[in-house]
């Protein structure tokens, strides 16, 4: 069933650490040239999955191939052709930007100059600081350097484990712009993130929670898996509104989203006007004013929370 | 009424580099105040000065009514602090962590016992009270860390990126705890990289290159910049600065 | 990967590792000064030279020769005669009460025996409750007797005393000579085992090891890249220790420096193997450090013959000392430094060390897995 040339094929992968099931029967495929996202909170099994794909760990059950090679038997064939960025800051803080890059180029049997073309758009942004120690860079710059180091040997696929964790919103956007550009140039990129909003930058995303895949789909389609209708509700005072809505007998979920609350109702086939009137009455009787509500399209985060079963880890 | 946090022209220089450049802040008691900024904008330096870990090069800062430079002890007794990852001891159990912090803040044995029972109960950790903190999920840890920071009932609590990497439901539960603390009169001073969380704050301050580039309620900021979300405000403010600094 | 690329990758690794060493100034200074400090401190603190030895003389029938011998002892400066007895029966109680350290028992008729050409009997009894000082005191006493004997005119038969073996090549009886080889072993253990374990576990903690493992670098390249810079540091340390020992204590160096450096390389590789093994089995720098301290430094100090002679250890520990690399290395260094011994004299020790090195490097390369878990 596997499409010919799928750069990543994962079949029924499981991995257990002690009593923790880090990966539980995970299967998916990444298509050539795709920007594929693994989205989910920390401790969901994303890092374990990356380590298995990067040939750093052996699965307990199931199989996986990267670039058509088996991650257990053909590790050396994989290693030379993969660019991997682990979740932690993985550079030498006491070496300069340039020294780090030169080192990682040599380790992969190439030179900085040979790989320069591919990394140029990224490296040019940090080149003014090439004599600075990597440990003295800001979070965003560190990640750009790490990405350059992962790309310098012109890999055929990039595996990036939470590259934007702890990075500010602006640097995160810039980082994703770079990933988009790499993907456009034909590189397959598999990336994980705990930030739901970043999933929108991927072509397809897999939602990961407690070692299981909740769903795999294009980010625009994931919202369609939300059960029922969703409404954005406003009202003052906002803090009180959460509690008031949760007490409403038909409320399924009430979650803050930005400056609104996302509300879903247990009943189906109810008109918007009808529901709005009902909730307006309910809330105004409990001290909420400026009430307003609009139907909205569910996003990835709404779906994620619904698929988590409304229960935190 | 006394301000919970009252900062005038607060400055910190490291050599020739000015990390925090004459900032002003006024946070009301019971307010949820969001403190945003890009990596390296000076947020951490500013917080360190407010909690008395770093002395200012200039300006004044009063927290909970006391001067952070001359009355550090008074300030520390009235504040709680939770940093991103390292607030709890991984190799102690849930209850041992609570007891430890209770002891540090000089609570009596009885107070510690009562408050830890109440806390464990409220967090639903009754069956995990004897587990090592290392073994509990990140979301639980962060909620526990926040509760521990609130153990001595501080009047101001500082939260430095408390929700990084936490799942979306736990993240929201965490914010409900923040609201509850604010409703009890505690001032919450919080930093985050999640821009949707910025919208949850009563007021925000956005730092860019050591200065405060914008301050106000989320609604005010969005209308001032003519955009739909705080994320857009943040990008407008921080992007030019980032390009300049090569970040 | 082509061989040229492998060599280039290894060179890059060595350059990187050298930069780590050079940029961590504090550690570097400590490592460079350590041999100096250790030679001086250990040299003064641990020397087992003994002065003011309390001497009991048993001289049943004093005559001119026995008096001459007694005069030798009182004139040596090291001995204080605390008792002169007629018969040896009282000796045991004196020893037991701790009133005497050494007894010299002169058989009656010393002068007449010597004149008649009958072998004279001089017995040296030492309080051996402290084996280290005991040996030294025995040796001092023997020297005095030997010196007296050497000056006897016309003595045909000699005196029956057993000279201490150490005296053959340590005639000044300066114990510091014996410690310097031990210190060299200790410093090399520190640099090779401890520093490799620390630098490797630091890469694990930093997450850089993950990237290195995923690269086409083979474990042997990573290990070799780690050891080469430290080998040079180890050479520097050996030379510093030798120089310090010569300048401060005038410890002689009689053998071949090339042979010593070659043996040090061998020993450093053994230490490196241990360091890699420890790093591979521990999860943090701190654990790796404590592990190395316990696993190498302690045995290298206590079970190697550096401070306590191996022969004075309890039997189980003597057996255990055979697997302590320092025990063999110290014999090699003592041989080269103090006896000027060549390879042929040290074959056993060098073979044992080579065996240990091969074993450890194979096990270390294996345990330094290609994967994380």
Image (cartoon, coloured by chain):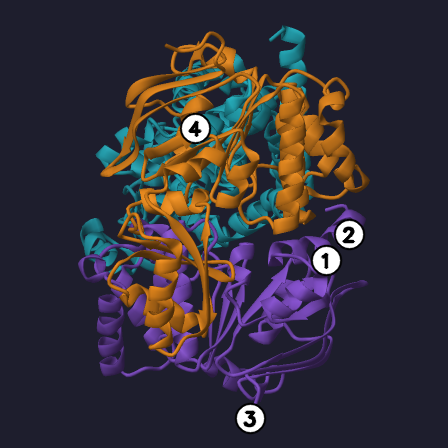
Chain colours: A orange, B purple, C cyan
Question: What is the number of the mark on residue B240?
Answer: 2
Q: Secondary structure at mark 2?
A: helix
Furthest-bottom residue in this view: B1
Residue shown at the point (27%, 70%) measured from the top left: B119
Residue C327: where, in percent of width, then height? 40, 30
Chain letter belonging to callout 1 = B
Residue B83: where, in percent of width, then height? 49, 62
Which quadrant would residue A279 be assigned to in this image? bottom left
Chain letter belonging to callout 2 = B
Looking at the image, residue A146 lies above or below residue C346: below
The quarter of the image holding the N terminus of chain B is bottom right
Count neighbours of disc 3 (C-alpha within 10 A) and say few if under 14, some if 14 to 19, many if 20 or more. few
Q: CA distance from mark 2 to mark 4?
A: 37 Å
Looking at the image, residue A49 lies above or below residue A297: above
Residue shown at the point (63%, 31%) measured from the top left: A180
The residue pinned by badge 1 equals: B237
Q: Secondary structure at mark 3?
A: loop
- Which label sits in the foreground, 4 or 1? 1
């Amino acid at each position: 069933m596997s499409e010919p040339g799928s750069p990543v094929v994962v079949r029924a992968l499981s991995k257990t650490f002690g009593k923790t099931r880090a990966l539980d029967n995970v299967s998916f495929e990444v298509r050539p040239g795709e920007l594929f996202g693994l989205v989910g909170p920390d401790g969901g099994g994303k890092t374990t999955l990356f380590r298995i794909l990067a040939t750093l760990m052996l699965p307990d059950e199931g199989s996986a191939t990267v670039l058509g090679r088996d991650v257990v038997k053909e590790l050396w064939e994989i290693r030379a052709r993969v660019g991997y960025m682990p979740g932690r800051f993985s550079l030498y803080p006491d070496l300069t930007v340039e020294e780090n890059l030169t080192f990682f180029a040599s380790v992969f049997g190439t030179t900085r100059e040979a790989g320069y073309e591919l990394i140029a758009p990224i490296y040019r942004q940090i080149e003014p600081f090439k004599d600075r120690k990597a440990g003295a860079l800001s979070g965003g710059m560190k990640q750009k350097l790490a990405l350059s180091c992962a790309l310098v040997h012109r890999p055929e696929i990039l595996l990036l484990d939470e590259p934007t964790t702890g990075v500010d919103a602006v640097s995160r956007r810039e980082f994703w712009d770079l990933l988009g550009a790499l993907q456009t140039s034909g590189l397959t990129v598999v990336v994980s993130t705990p930030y739901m909003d970043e999933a929108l930058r991927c072509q397809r995303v897999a939602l990961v929670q407690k070692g299981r895949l909740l769903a795999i789909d294009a980010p625009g389609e994931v919202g369609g898996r939300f059960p029922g209708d969703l409404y954005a509700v406003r009202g003052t005072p906002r803090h009180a509104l959460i509690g008031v809505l949760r007490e409403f007998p038909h409320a399924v979920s009430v979650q803050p989203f930005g400056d609104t609350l996302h509300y879903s109702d247990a009943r189906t086939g109810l008109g918007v006007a009808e529901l709005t009137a009902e909730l307006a009455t309910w809330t105004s009787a409990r001290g909420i004013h400026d009430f307003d509500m609009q139907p909205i399209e569910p996003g990835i985060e709404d779906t994620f929370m619904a698929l988590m079963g409304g229960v935190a880890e | 009424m006394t301000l919970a946090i009252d900062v005038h022209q607060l400055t910190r220089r490291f050599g020739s580099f000015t990390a925090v450049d004459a900032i002003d802040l006024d946070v009301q008691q019971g307010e949820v105040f969001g403190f945003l900024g890009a990596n390296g904008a000076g947020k951490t330096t500013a917080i360190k000065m407010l909690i008395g870990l770093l002395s200012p090069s200039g300006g004044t800062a009063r927290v909970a009514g006391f001067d952070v430079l001359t009355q550090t002890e008074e300030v520390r007794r009235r504040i709680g602090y939770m940093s991103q990852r390292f607030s709890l001891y991984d190799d102690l159990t849930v209850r041992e962590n609570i007891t430890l912090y209770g002891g540090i803040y000089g609570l009596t044995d009885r107070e510690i016992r009562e408050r830890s029972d109440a806390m464990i109960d409220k967090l639903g950790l009754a069956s995990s009270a004897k587990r090592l903190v290392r073994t509990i999920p990140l979301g639980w840890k962060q909620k526990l860390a926040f509760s521990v920071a609130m153990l001595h009932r501080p009047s101001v609590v500082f939260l430095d990126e408390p929700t990084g990497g936490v799942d979306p439901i736990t993240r929201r539960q965490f914010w409900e705890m923040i609201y509850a603390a604010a409703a009890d009169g505690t001032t919450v001073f919080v930093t985050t990289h999640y821009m949707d969380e910025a919208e949850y704050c009563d007021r925000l301050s956005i730092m860019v290159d050591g200065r405060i580039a914008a301050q106000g309620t989320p609604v005010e900021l969005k209308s001032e910049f003519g955009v739909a979300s705080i994320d857009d405000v943040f990008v407008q403010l921080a992007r030019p600065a980032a390009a300049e600094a090569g970040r | 990967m082509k061989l040229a690329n492998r060599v280039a990758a290894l060179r890059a690794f060595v350059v990187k590792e050298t930069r780590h060493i050079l940029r961590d100034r504090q550690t570097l200074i400590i490592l460079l000064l350590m041999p100096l400090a250790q030679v001086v401190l250990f040299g003064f603190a641990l020397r087992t030279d003994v002065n003011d030895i309390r001497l009991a003389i048993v001289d049943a029938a004093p005559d001119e020769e026995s008096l001459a011998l007694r005069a030798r002892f009182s004139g040596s400066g090291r001995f204080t005669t605390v008792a002169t007895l007629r018969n040896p029966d009282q000796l045991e109680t004196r020893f037991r009460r701790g009133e005497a350290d050494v007894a010299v028992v002169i058989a009656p008729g010393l002068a007449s025996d010597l004149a008649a050409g009958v072998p004279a009997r001089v017995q040296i009894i030492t309080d051996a409750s402290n084996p280290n000082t005991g040996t030294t005191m025995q040796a001092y006493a023997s020297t005095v007797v030997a010196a007296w004997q050497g000056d006897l005119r016309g003595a045909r038969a000699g005196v029956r005393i057993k000279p201490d073996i150490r005296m053959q090549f340590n005639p000044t009886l300066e114990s510091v000579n014996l410690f310097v080889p031990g210190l060299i072993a200790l410093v090399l253990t520190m640099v090779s085992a401890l520093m490799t374990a620390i630098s490797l576990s630091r890469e694990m903690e930093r997450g850089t090891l993950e990237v290195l493992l995923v690269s086409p670098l083979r474990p042997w390249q990573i290990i070799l890249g780690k050891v080469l810079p430290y080998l040079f540091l180890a050479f520097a340390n050996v030379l510093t220790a030798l120089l310090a020992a010569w300048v401060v204590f005038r410890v002689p160096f009689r053998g071949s420096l090339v042979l010593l450096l070659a043996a040090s390389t061998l020993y450093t590789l053994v230490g490196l193997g241990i360091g890699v093994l420890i790093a591979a089995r521990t999860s943090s720098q701190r654990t790796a450090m404590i592990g190395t301290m316990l696993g190498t430094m302690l045995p290298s100090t206590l079970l190697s013959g550096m401070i306590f002679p191996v022969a004075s250890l309890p039997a189980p520990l003597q057996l255990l000392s055979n697997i302590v690399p320092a025990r063999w290395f110290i014999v090699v260094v003592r041989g080269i430094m103090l006896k000027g011994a060549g390879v042929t004299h040290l074959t056993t020790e060098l073979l044992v060390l080579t065996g240990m090195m091969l074993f450890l490097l194979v096990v270390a390369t294996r345990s330094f897995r290609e994967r994380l878990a």
